[in-house]
Image: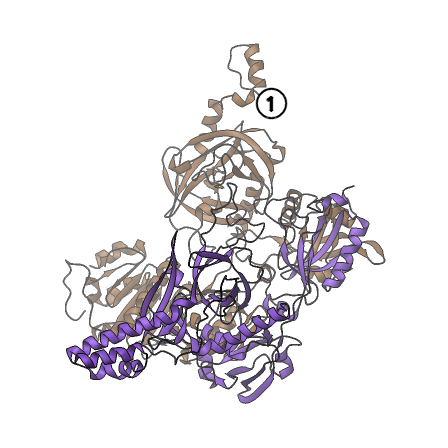
Amino acid sequence: MRRMTDGLRARLAAGGLAGVVLATGCAQLATPSAGRFTVRSLQAGLSRAAEFLKPSVVAVTVEPVQPAGTDANPSAEGGSPAPAPVHLTGTILTPEGHVLVPGRYKSDYGGRIEVRLGVDVYPARPVRSSDTLNMTILKFRPRAPLRPLDRRPSTPPSAGEWMVMVVPTVTADAEERFVFPMVSRGEIAGAYRRHLVEAMPGEARGAPVADLQGRWAGIFDGRMVVVARDFADDLEQMLREVVSAAATGGVMVARGWLGVSIEPVNRDLARRRGWPPTAIWVTHVAAGSPAQTSGLRAGDVVTHVNDRAILLYGARATEFFFQTLGHRPGQPFRLRVLRNGAPIEIAGQLGRRPEPETLQAEDLGLTVQTVKDYDVFHRSLFVERGVLVTAVEKGSPAATGSAFGRTLLMPGDVIVEMDGRPTPDVTSFRAVLDDLRARRAQVVLIRLVRGRSTDFEALNLTLGRAGRRNAP
Amino acid sequence: MPRCWVGGVGALSAAIACGAAITDDISDDVVRRVDPSVVAIQHERAAGSGFFITEDGYLLTNGHVVRGNDEEDPTQPARSITVVMYDDQKLPARVIGFSLDPDVALLKVDPPRPVRPVEFANPREAHVGQVCFAVGTPVGLKRTYTRGILSNIERADLGTETRVFQTDAAINPGNSGGPLFDREGRVLGLNTYAGRGQNLGFTIPIDVALVLKDHFLRHGRFIRALVPIFLTSELYDELARAFEVERGILINYVLPGSAAYRAGLRDGDILIAVDGRPCSARRRVELLDFEWEQSIRTPGESVAYTVVRRTPKGVTNLTVRAQLEAMEPLPTMGRHAGELVETRIEAIGLGVLPIVTAHRILHALPDDRGVLVQTVQPFSAAARATLRKLDIITSVAGRPTPDVSSFIAALESNLAAHVSEIEMDTVRGRRRLPTALAPPYPLAGRRVAWVAVTTNAAFADLIRRELLADGAEIRRDVEASLDGVILVADRAVDLAKHDGLADSMGKVWARGGVIAAVGPAALFAIERVPDLRKKKMTTDPVLSAEVKRLGGRYTGGAMVADGRWITATGSDRASVRAFARAVRRALWALDSPPEEPDDADTPTTPTD
């Protein structure tokens, strides 16, 4: 007996039989010794998984930022206390120091981000984030090459299956790596499947998760384990872009763009019309977009994306739509839609989302962008050409009326005329601005559309930071 | 030369007294004169102050003191208003009219003897620094006098429709609606508790209140005059310089297609005269004064606007003519609670409003004709249909629904036919989305008789619609096999004319059906179905003695549901809504075993 168990233990340690024993053993081994064996196998699997993960995690601390120039709590008495830093777990992706963390941090993130490796603390910066994955790749410079996680994904876990997570926990003088076993409560469907597990400490967010065979099963997002098999390809793609960008000097990669606005179909309407209840209604197709080029129209009802049927409802259906569609400009897409009840295939290529022409007019205290078809639809604008105000700087001419607390112009306003000249786009707006500057104009009349109605405001250009230039 | 109260000690003290007016007492004489005019006002939810303006008992207070809490009809005032006079005499009061902005209400009591009305000051002669005093019931403390000065007489930045006065006389919750007197005891205005800062009280000038009083007496509501629709702005310094004018009022927007547009006004015109009289607003308070003067004119009058217009060719003056119209009822906007009554069907969780022009501008709604979604109750069929407040419903099952009556008619015919998914087209901003409403019809299969002899069609329709939307079959004829009989009547005697009604009701009751009656109809029911007399009920309170004489159990209250017998006073929407809910529940529960009785000392027979 002892020889057999010793032998088995040896083989388990070598990682050979474990899968077979654990998968089939529990049902068949009903004797007390079998029970002890199962528990020991479980413990062995847990420690194997932990050993697999331990070298490839780091503790990450992110300091939150407030937007510049604003107060989180504007009041006569002063601001609010600074929000606490956020502790996360990062997964090492490359020996050079690329780390995967949950959440989206843009490359111009204003707060401090630090990576803790043993006793050493390193500053890190975000290099690439993904909206669909809701994850960011950070980069720091380690003293020695790191051990990246072996990212060959395991078979997706099942409900009731045991998994393991390693979470680095930072105290004043040390960094410990704790092992958290967990059990899947059940799977949640989606383009990226997730498994519900028990509650975990906040800093566990981002931790990689392994199965008892010691293979990578997923990433813990704070509430659930996102299945590695489903997003591994997208992650590798993102990493490749980051590494190649670094090699070529860091070109920003744009996201693939289709140019549609969608809403899940009302289930009762779908039943009446004979559509699948999980279908998606196209509410708008942006002018000049790949969607328009491909022949997609508002009113089309989408049932399949890239040959995958949409089988989810509500917000998960729209999430599935965008995640399955693809992320890269140039990537081909296929949609199956119902038009007037008849199925049609739509095919095309994702494009690049056009960046709106933006201008920061410092003299006025306004940030504006040319109104695009997208804005007209999403903001329900009543005017199709003009410049849209997206920000108004406090204390500037655009902000200063005679009543405190009410700015003359507001985000959402569309400026159609300035100084008596039409401003259908940023270029014409800039031309008028240059002219005002040259003339040292003290007052400028702006004609804008707010909601449905027209309004006129006259800005006093002797106010604000640039104002002294125009003083009489 | 201000009149000074002299303490009677000689010329020197007289001179000192005149010069140091702020430290003068308010004379006993003045207090005695004004005291009887000021009242406390109380109702089921709030309290405030007021003052008499006529000997026969008309009094003014703030609109918000007497507003009701009918969610669907903001024009309803509070129900049981009591006026408490200075000598603690209590009188019931009725509301003649009320408005939330300007915040004025006119009430009437019937005093046994003539009361002392206030005297009015001329608000146009008010000046900053003038001594004034307020009288009212701050935090319930009756007949409290507080004193201060007029801190400002041109307050135009509170979002109110008219300018208001500002005082540092202490104005606390409870002072609302009370008078602000000048030192002679003449009313300058009505006080409103504003709730911000210290020593910042606001007063509506009495001339504004008296205009509203006239409107309430004549029409029951304040009817503004306008040429629809153009929006104006004051020409603040930079705007005047930019437009190169010294005087005038900016017309910043003219609604295309409206009467103002057709008359010839355009965005950017500077209004310089009305009916030949020059006008100008360089400050907000001047704009409010101008707008007020125009809105209190008479609808139907012609008006001429002279404007200055800048065109590429140069500057021109032109005069356009138009006719003033009565403004449409207001939607909820700013302090105005609005005057639009919602049509709500709880059974599907949907309430709608008619769309008025003000809605379209306020909420930037497109021009589509339809009804405006006002209420979507959570977890209802309307919520499942993903309807949202401010959606416009333009058609129901393919039929266009440009107004509330066509919407309700289309909806009712689909509900009566138990259509499982009622298609609707909706407009939300630039989105056009079809959806479908799937009512659960929990009362499908239930058949009820509906007998309504009442002038209050709105309440009767409310009940009938709820039953219809739940899927009940509603019939006019009463017969023994029905699941329920619902009676609505202004007078019990009106129901006596229905042949066989009493007989069939008795049979329905005996077979285990529901009997439900609103107002005096309940009296008819207990007269004709003696078994009902054992059960608790309510009705119009004036009939309670009759009920007791018949041996009925009058418990009072707005609505009483005692098993399968349901009654309500029907005097307000809340009781009618409660009634409708109780009837729906009772019909739904008909197949279930009877509930335990709540009243421990009332034994009920097993068949109840």
B162 on left or right of B199 = right
Q: Where is residue B573 shown, x and y percent of the image?
A: 39, 59
Q: Where is residue B451 shown, x and y percent of the image?
A: 35, 70
Q: Colour of chain A?
A: purple
- Residue A151 to residue A308: above or below: above
Q: Judging from the image, what secondary structure is the residue with disc 1 in?
A: loop
Mark 1 belongs to which subunit?
Answer: B
Q: Residues within 10 Å of mark 1 (few under 14, many from 20)?
A: few
In this orientation, which residue lies closer to the viewer: B594 or A224?
Answer: A224
Q: Where is residue A197 shown, x and y percent of the image?
A: 34, 70
Q: Colour of chain B?
A: brown
Which residue corresponds to the image point at 24% horizontal and 80% vertical from the top-left?
A8
What is the three-letter code of the residue carrying label 1? Pro
User: Image quadrant for the N terminus of chain B?
Assistant: top right
Task: Write down the quadrant of residue B108 in the picture.
Answer: top left
Q: Is residue B255 visible?
A: no
A456 on left or right of B156 = right
Q: Is residue A232 visible?
A: yes
**Residue at which label 1 appears:** B2
